[in-house]
Image (cartoon, rainbow, N blue to C red):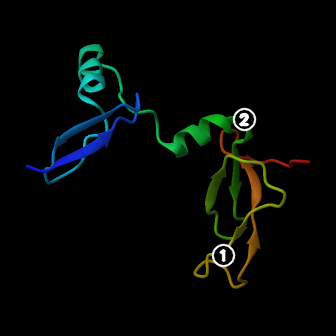
């Protein structure tokens, strides 16, 4: 059998195993056993979830005044986003406005 070299994503140790078809294990046998015994999540959250948690204070909702399409941003924007929904309005670009969904009203951010 041909051996392949793998590295653990948690502890960065290198180990060898017989080459096999399918997905490569991301964890070494020691880390995998520890994760099973402790019964904890093995890998951290996805990068997009980490980004949302980091910028949760900057969460802002926007709505298109023409077609009522809504988006949520998690970063500060220098300009308001635009809606380019061709089936809803005749102009190609409509500037979206801030919207507070909890209070169901348009918010003016300065």
Give residue 83's quadrant in the image.
bottom right
**Callout 1: helix, strand or loop?**
loop
Q: Nearer the viewer, mark 2 or mark 1?
A: 2
Q: Which of 13 and 34 is in front in this view?
A: 13
Give residue 50's quadrant in the image.
top right
- Report how many numbered discs are placed on residues in the image: 2
At horizontal 66% and vertical 75% (from top left) the residue drawn is 84
At horizontal 72% and vertical 48% (from top left) the residue drawn is 75
The residue at which mark 1 appears reads as: 84
State the image coordinates of residue 6 (x, y, percent, origin top left): 29, 42
Q: Nearer the viewer, residue 86 or 37?
A: 37
**Callout 2: helix, strand or loop?**
helix
The residue at which mark 2 appears reads as: 57
Mark 2–mark 1 distance (CA, rounded to whole Å): 27 Å
- Residue 68, compared with residue 8, is above or below; it is below
* Extreme residue in the top direction: 38
Badge 2 or badge 1: first in the primary sequence = 2
At horizontal 23% and vertical 21% (from top left) the residue drawn is 33
* Extreme residue in the right direction: 110
At horizontal 84% and vertical 57% (from top left) the residue drawn is 78
- Residue 59, compared with residue 90, is above or below; it is above
* Extreme residue in the front direction: 2
- Image check: 59 left or right of 80? left
Q: Which of 40 and 19 is in front in this view?
A: 19
State the image coordinates of residue 24 (x, y, percent, origin top left): 24, 46
* Extreme residue in the left direction: 1
Q: Quick one: label 2, few (<14), some, or many (20+) residues within 10 Å?
A: few
- Residue 16, compared with residue 11, is above or below; it is below
Circle on res. 40: none
State the image coordinates of residue 37 (x, y, percent, origin top left): 24, 15
State the image coordinates of residue 5 (x, y, percent, origin top left): 27, 44
Q: Quick one: label 1, few (<14), some, or many (20+) residues within 10 Å?
A: some
């Amino acid at each position: 059998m041909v051996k392949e070299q793998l590295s653990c994503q948690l502890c960065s140790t290198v180990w060898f195993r017989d080459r096999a078809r399918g997905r490569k294990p991301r964890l070494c046998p020691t880390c995998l056993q520890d994760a099973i015994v402790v019964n904890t999540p093995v890998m951290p959250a996805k990068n997009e979830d980490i980004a949302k948690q980091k910028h949760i204070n900057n969460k802002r909702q926007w709505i298109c005044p023409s077609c009522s399409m809504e988006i949520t941003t998690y970063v500060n924007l220098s300009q308001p986003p635009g809606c380019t929904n061709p089936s809803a309005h005749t102009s190609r670009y409509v500037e979206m406005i801030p919207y507070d969904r909890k209070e169901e009203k348009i918010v003016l951010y300065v």
